[in-house]
Image (cartoon, grey):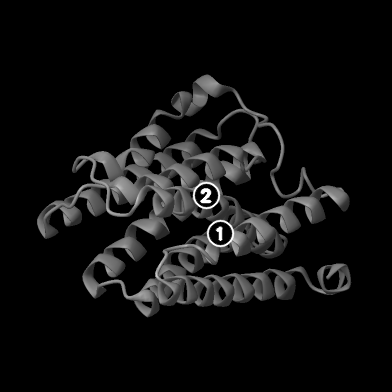
Amino acid sequence: MKKIYEKNELTFSLIWIGVYVVLFSVADSISLDLGTAKIITVPVCLFMTIFLAVWIVKNGLSRKYGLCKMRIDYKRYLYFLPLVVIASTNLWCGVSLHLSIFETILYVISMICVGFIEEVIFRGFLFQALCRENVKRAIVISSITFGIGHIVNLLNGAELIPTLLQICYAIAIGFLFTVIFYQSESLIPCIVTHSLINSLSVVAGDGTEALNIVTAIVLTVISGSYAIWLLSNRVKGGKN
């Protein structure tokens, strides 16, 4: 693994993205076949999370991949209020328990891990591999790749329109998270927010199609506007 990383970081990141997509799709499918959502996905999630964290720390890459404290003035980040709003969107239509208690616990565990894994491979591995040549292009590619990656949900039975809406706002959220990582040199706020968004989806109330569209628009506007504001203000502690 380290030899691939040292030879070509971009290839390394793409391999991880591929492994992640395939393993999680297969694990989710097997879980459903067994009759218990996430029963196989959780062990896969935990293994990948622990493996990535240990590998990064062991090779002295914690600072490079953002597993560290932020180097910023928190006031200039508006105390992350936009992130709180984004994380709460799954509660806007109320709360409803869709799965059994056991399955809900499994779902939350898997989603916390997914928040960590996706931030590390998309914002960490992929972005850092691309930003050596062109930072702006790296931000764009990392954001779009993260958003389009959600199309795999169609293979797991998701409906077309909700998935397309998810892709749109995921690109905007990916843009915001990439900017935060680029400027603060930390993935922690991104991991926390991402994990909350994912985890709370298991208790999200059922909204109408119109409300889902409005929510997607709000998420896109807030994420995109906040990212642009951070870039235009050159938040203290970030890179120039």
Name the residue rendered at 18%, 57% in the picture: 213
Question: Label 2: which residue?
Answer: 109
Mark 1–mark 2 CB contact (< 8 Å): yes
Please give the label number shown on residue 42: 1
Circle 1: element type = helix
Give above or below for 82 relative to 138.
above
- Snapshot quadrant of residue 168: bottom left
Closest to the observer, 208 or 187: 208
Q: Where in the figure is residue 170, as x and y percent of width and height?
A: 39, 58
Q: How many numbered marks are there?
A: 2
Q: Is residue 19 left or right of residue 40?
A: right
Q: Position of residue 152 (x, y in %)?
A: 42, 75
Residue at image x 68%, y 75%? 15
Residue 157: which quarter of the image?
Answer: bottom left
Q: Which residue is painted at 80% across and 73% down in the image? A: 8
- Image location of residue 95, percent across then percent down: 24, 41
Q: Residues within 10 Å of mark 1 (few under 14, many from 20)?
A: many
**Figure check: 151 above or below 119:** below
Q: Quadrant of the C terminus?
A: top right
Say whether disc 1 or disc 2 marks the residue closer to the N-terminus.
1
Amino acid identity at mark 2: Ile
**Residue 169 seen anywhere in this rendered image of the structure:** yes
Instruction: Classify 151 as above or below 228.
Output: below
Q: Give the distance between the C-alpha atoms of the residues marked 1 and 2, in whole angstroms.
A: 7 Å
Q: Is residue 108 left or right of residue 21?
A: left
Could you say whether the residue bearing mark 2 is in a helix, strand or loop?
helix
Which numbered tag is attached to residue 34?
Answer: none
